Image (cartoon, rainbow, N blue to C red):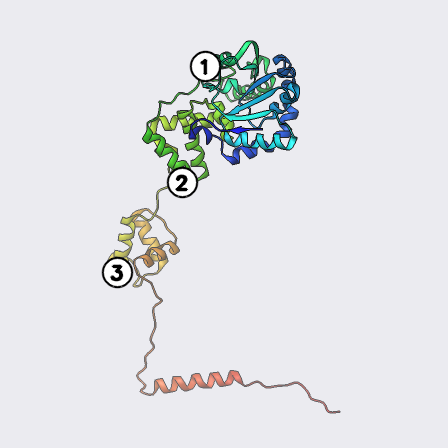
Amino acid sequence: MAHEQHGSPSQRGTWRSTDAAQWQHDVERRRQDFAAATRRMLEAAGLKPGDHVLDIAAGTGDQSLVAARLVGPSGSILATDLSADMLTIAARVVQQEGVTNITTRVMDAQQLDLEDDTFDAVICRLGLMLLPDPGQALRAIHRVLKPGGKLAALVWSSPKHNPLWSLPLSTVKQLLRKCGRLVEKEGAMRTPLKLPVPTAEEVAALDHLYRTTRDARLRTRAQIVLLAAEQRLTAPAIAVMVREDDQTVRNWLKRYRAEGIDGLHDRPMPGAPPKITPAYAAQLVAAVRRRPRSLGQPYSLWTLQRLADYLAEQTGIRLSYETVRLCLKRAGIVLSRPQHTISSPDPEYAVKKKRSKTRATASRLVTTSTMPTSSI
């Protein structure tokens, strides 16, 4: 089995290894969910031993393996995709299965670098409707098909014929009606949101942001814009790749179109303005440096609570005394408790006071036992 890589570096980097690994992690669920539909697609392609088949948007090659068994060793399957990481996983799975007639190649479905009249059949499972220009892809497919060759594609249908989408949509619409809101626009796919072709500087800035930021959300937003601007993918296709919903992708594309790369960053969250303004801090420091009575207060010393009450009357800003203490600390001011000094006209007052303290301490150390004693 061969594994070839063609296409631009941006194409090869569309799906990162972590995305491809997560996609492969769900392989068993996909095989079960799409087994019947995949079988009908391959039946419509009319595959038979010896056929040469092109698989468009092959991903990790689930349907390629089934097709390879149908065409047998004398036939061949060329599995193409934009993601080199996805095809690397496909090559590994094919090798583990012991299949030798599958070749993988990184390629854009809209620009097939293949010779005319090469394939007996072309298959595409859940990829054709995600292309920016399906008409261009169909023209390329028609060119590489042999005369009488067949195209079999598995795509989403309109909501009327697609319960997987129509049932959740109808449920949401009923809930919205109860809230007084109506969904006015219906359809299987929304109109693609087009971005202008980016300049080389814009691509370089987005690529630098993608590779250097440590914010996973910001990295995803840059990837969304790169996929839309460089590869012209639609919002639903990008949503599948980055594991986000369609509307989230559209919102970030609109932000980028309106504000540029700065619009990808989170906006500052609104909140209450800080209570300690520079004017409040200046007035607090000015007040604590004056005596309370000079400011018309009925006391001689400041306490933290008195300062908080006084500033609340003057500024209308009520703060706790602890906040006032921290504000004073930042200004290098610390309130201390007043020290009271007791004086006496007796010249021996200090000696007597010290003597009385010594006696009090000694009396506390003396203990008297009243427990009776006994002898044996």
Q: Which mark is residue 259?
A: none
N-terminal-most mark, 1 or 3: 1
Q: Image quadrant for the N terminus?
A: top right
Q: Secondary structure at mark 3?
A: loop
Residue type at tag 2: Thr
Q: Nearer the viewer, mark 2 or mark 1?
A: 1
**Quadrant of the rendered image containing residue 34:** top right
Percent across and percent down for residue 61 are: 59, 26
- Neighbor class of circle 3 (other Cα within 10 Å; few <14, some 14-19, many 20+) is few
Residue drawn at (63%, 15%) of the image: 47
Distance, label 2 to label 1, CA atoms, is 35 Å
Q: What residue occupies the far front of the structure in this picture?
A: 74
Residue type at tag 1: Gln
Residue drawn at (40%, 85%) of the image: 354
Q: Image quadrant for the C terminus?
A: bottom right
Residue type at tag 3: Arg
Distance, label 1 to label 3, CA atoms, is 80 Å
Q: Which residue is mark 3?
A: 289
Q: Secondary structure at mark 2?
A: helix
Q: Secondary structure at mark 1?
A: helix
Q: Which residue is mark 1?
A: 136
Q: Nearer the viewer, mark 3 or mark 2?
A: 2
Q: What residue occupies the far top of the structure in this picture?
A: 148
N-terminal-most mark, 2 or 1: 1
Q: Which residue is mark 2?
A: 212
Percent across and percent down for residue 308 are: 35, 54
**Quadrant of the rendered image containing residue 175:** top right
